[in-house]
Image: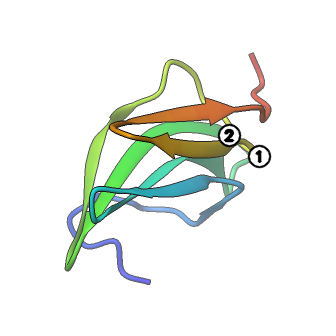
Amino acid sequence: GDFSGADITTTFSDYSMVSLANELYLFGGLDDYYTDLDTCYKFRDPDWTKIGHMMAGRRGHRSIATSNSIIHIGGYNDQ
């Protein structure tokens, strides 16, 4: 897909996604260089926006939406 507006320059995998308040959020992952990513993105049709960073890079985790917050559970990082 197209990540227009999000300044994404590589492919990545092992991220988590969750929806909250009619928006889709994407967290972390692993890039082509096997680097754990700490970036966070939000999708609101039709654009992706970079919204910040997690405290550390993370891959293989899960994210859960509860009321008005998002919790990240598990996963791995190289730190």
What distance separates the C-alpha of mark 1 from that of mark 2? 13 Å
Give me the disc on residue 60.
1
Give left or right: position of 50 versus 64.
left
Image quarter (top left, top right, bottom left or bottom right) of the C terminus:
top right
- Do callouts 1 and 2 mark residues in contact (Cβ within 8 Å)? no
Q: Nearer the viewer, residue 35 or 19?
A: 19
Where is residue 30? Give x, y as percent.
Answer: 68, 49
Image quarter (top left, top right, bottom left or bottom right) of the N terminus:
bottom left
Q: Nearer the viewer, residue 37 or 20?
A: 20
SS assignment at label 1:
loop
Give left or right: position of 52 versus 76.
left
The residue at which mark 2 appears reads as 35
Give left or right: position of 74 versus 28.
right
Where is residue 16? Give x, y as percent.
Answer: 61, 52
| Neighbour tally class for label 1: few under 14, some 14-19, many 20 plus, Cα within 10 Å | some
Mark in front: 1 vs 2:
1
Q: Which colouring convention does the figure follow?
A: rainbow
Residue drawn at x 57%, y 21% is: 56
Amino acid on which disc 2 is placed? Thr
Give me the disc on residue 3.
none
Mark toward the start of the polypeptide (1 vs 2) = 2
Residue drawn at x 72%, y 42% is: 61
**Image height check: is 25 above or below 34?**
below
Amino acid on which disc 1 is placed? Gly
Residue drawn at x 41%, y 43% is: 40
**Image height check: is 21 above or below 63?**
below
Q: Quadrant of residue 35?
A: top right
Q: Nearer the viewer, residue 60 or 34?
A: 60
Residue drawn at x 60%, y 33% is: 72
Where is residue 41? Give x, y as percent.
Answer: 36, 51
Give left or right: position of 1 versus 58.
left
Q: Nearer the viewer, residue 6 or 33?
A: 6
